[in-house]
Image: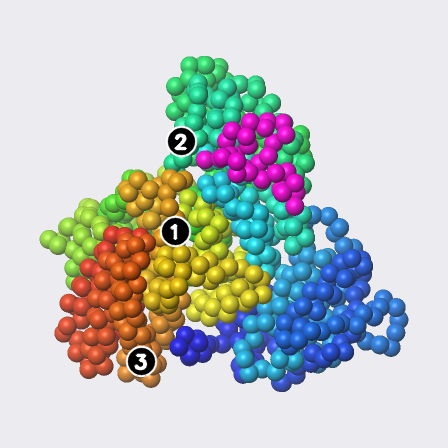
Amino acid sequence: MWQQLIIFLNSVLLLSVCINANAKPINIMPLPAELKIAPDSTHFHISPALSFATSGIPDNNALQFKQTMQEILAARIQTDLTLNSINADVKSSDKPDILVKLTQQPLNRPPQLGDDESYELDISSTQLTLIASNELGIKHGLNTLSQLLLTTPQGIGKADIPAIVIKDKPRYPWRGLLIDSVRHFMPIETIKRQLDGMASAKLNVFHWHLTDDQGWRIESKIYPALHQKASDGKFYTQAEITSIVEYASHKGIRVVPELDLPGHASAIAVAYPELMSAEGPYEMERQWGVFEPILDPTNPEVYQFIDKLVGELTTLFPDHYLHIGGDEVPPTQWLNNENITEYMQKNALLNAEDLQAHFNQKVNNILAQHKRFMMGWDEIFHPKLPSDILIQSWRGLDSLSQITAAGYQGLLSTGFYIDQAQYTDYHYRNDPQSEPAPLVALLPADVQGEVWQFTMPRYKGSPIHGELLIVHDSQPYAYLSLNGKLSKKVNKLILSENKIEYRIDTWMGPTTAEFTISNDTVLAGHIFVGNTLYPITGQRSALAQASQLTKAKLKQAPVELIADHNKVLGGEATIWSELITHENIDIRVWPRLYAIAERLWSPKELTDSQNMYQRLASISSYSQRYIGLEHKQQQQQGLQNLVDQNSDISPLQLLAETVEPAHYYTRHHLKFQANEYHQQAPLNRFVDYLDVESLPLIFLHQGLAKAKDKESLEFANALNLIETALLKWQKNQPRLKQLIDQSPKLHSIKQVAELNDKTLNLGIELVKLCRNNSLTELSALDDELISILSYKGEVVLASAHLLRELIRRCR
């Protein structure tokens, strides 16, 4: 069914490339910068007697490239194939069928920031040519060729490759993935598998999070107590680290280690308590969160410790950058230590931020002596540090804009936190060059505004405070500020009597607000962060001119603070491992990471999320079969472990098509409430093996979106597909309930199954109402769906969102 739906939704690629309208879909991720397909049926034929040649490539690399080419072509024709080598550098009348050529000297060293990664792939009827300036480009070109050949839909001749010209290069030089090996240890084979996936997605930086409160994961010859006392025996030997660095380098990936300083240091405190700002002893930290142990910046031994550690790390990691963390530094131990506060007064350090900058200056000098550049999170940003440091932003585009405006280089990670469950198209819209604009630059001074303030409680931590400014122009529009940050224009504003609705992307995820007004001043309703409902309360503020409303905001961010996009080097996705283990990491990372990789590689203008999802489904299958990623295998094995080994898990797989894990940090916060937010908490339940989004539901949403109105053929087709899906899922319910009753590990989802039953029954009723154009009952149905979505749990009845969209279309 889903294959039919994808075909139904298939559309022409919307990007600045020339593609024959009759051509088959090009299922490449990331899409190339330039791509042209021959306008006729020209193709290159794969025969058993193809000749192969290289030019400008050393013999060892030439053999590797030949072997990879053979594997790709053989996989396409599904039979063994041997390329016949000839010498392209010797003048000959023989023209090789396949030519791989370097235009410059090979690098013969680990990759570095700024290396040329461009390539050209030219396939004609007579020759397949791959050209690049160095081996990095050749590897990218081979990955593109692999996807081009092995994701082509059935029906095209196995031995025929469409004639195509690709000229490709990355948009950003830094395209990374952070893997947290601390909170839950990731075995070597797990790391290497992620590197395989990264290379296929043209990502080029593996940011390895190796130290934190809950453990120290690096074998140290100089300070052995670190891994002996603070790792629970789970650490990487130096030989294993070297093997990972070499493996990554072979795939064109740099490895940047993170050594957390001065906070997130509980593991250091266990091994060397004398380096901390408060007396020990200390015990291993098992909880998740931010903790007090912090290095003493007044102790000379601390800097000796850092110096020797950095020296040791430089022998393991050849990259020029070393990440010092620097985030979430609690000042409690500093401010309670009399020696430290006296030191601050003596050195004119007014607060903890100044003291951290003072500490970072000394650390930066140490790094410079070891020929390393400092990088860290937002909190290291300080004018006393040199501008050659690199700052990775987890605080958002506001922070990144301030960083680059001040002349510092930056990376974006906000919006790419894939340890959270979030829709892939949210990541896809998250561009490092986007920035919120101050209101004063956009609003006339005499425009009258209407301000609503609201509060969104969370299950852990402080509530979110929002301020919505609605401008009553000929076409009303609105700006939203959350927790005092710069305002951002909402994407879609709907105003009706006693109702306010809007949509906007925030740091929490895609956000949809549905507010109701009573007594002209009181606000109620809810916000959906992704798929998850949060109730709100609020009230109207006094009316004021928009220009006056912006003044307080502008004090926080002056108008002249303009971001320098040339200082943005790219971005990094992050997979923090509070709720991740080696048994489900692939489910959380793949295939979503391909879309983030495309945002960092491909042209900015590429924004068609419908086409992205269609290609993502194809790449998902390709990456399992040919790259060795295990997102589907991990899901299948995880679900099987929840039931008897002889039981059929298809009822659980069908349930997984209708539900999703709660988005944003909802699961983290619920686990905190349940006292399961710690290192020993089980992560082997149904929710732990769910995809972050249901692709079947995504494609049904897309079918609805294509319908111009409810009288159209597209709407009729979408309605038929929705009905077919609902009936299939409903038919599964008795088997699902029986399996849950028989399996103790599934008893926790009994209520989910019951709510799913109710949702499906409502959906089938809704389809009938839509067909009969019976609109009077839709509001009551919508209220019931809201009630279902109000269920407070780690699993969300995501099909209810599809049905609510269907109600809007039926109206």
Question: Viewer-proximal residue, 391 or 715?
Answer: 715
Residues marked 1 and 2 touching at CB (< 8 Å): no
- Residue at position x 52%, y 41% in the image: 209
Q: What are the residue bounds of the magenta stretch? A: 214-243
Dot placed on the residue nearer the N-terminal end, 3 or 2? 2
Residue matched to label 3 = 720
Q: CA distance from mark 3 to mark 2?
A: 54 Å
Question: Viewer-proximal residue, 334 or 645?
Answer: 645
At label 1, counting other C-alpha atoms closer than 10 Å, the crowd grade (few under 14, some 14-19, many 20 or more) is: some
Q: Which mark is residue 768?
A: none
The residue type indicated by label 1 comes to: Asn
Residue matched to label 2 = 291
Dot placed on the residue nearer the N-terminal end, 1 or 3? 1
Residue 503 picture location, percent across and down: 32, 59
Residue matched to label 1 = 684
Circle nearer the viewer, 1 or 2: 1
Specify the quadrant of the image occupied by residue 130.
bottom right
Kind of element beneath mark 1: loop
Kind of element beneath mark 3: helix
Q: CA distance from mark 1 to mark 3?
A: 36 Å
- Residue at position x 63%, y 46% in the image: 244
Q: Is residue 71 left or right of residue 285?
A: right
As drawn, the residue found furthest toward the left would be 519
Q: Is residue 367 visible?
A: no
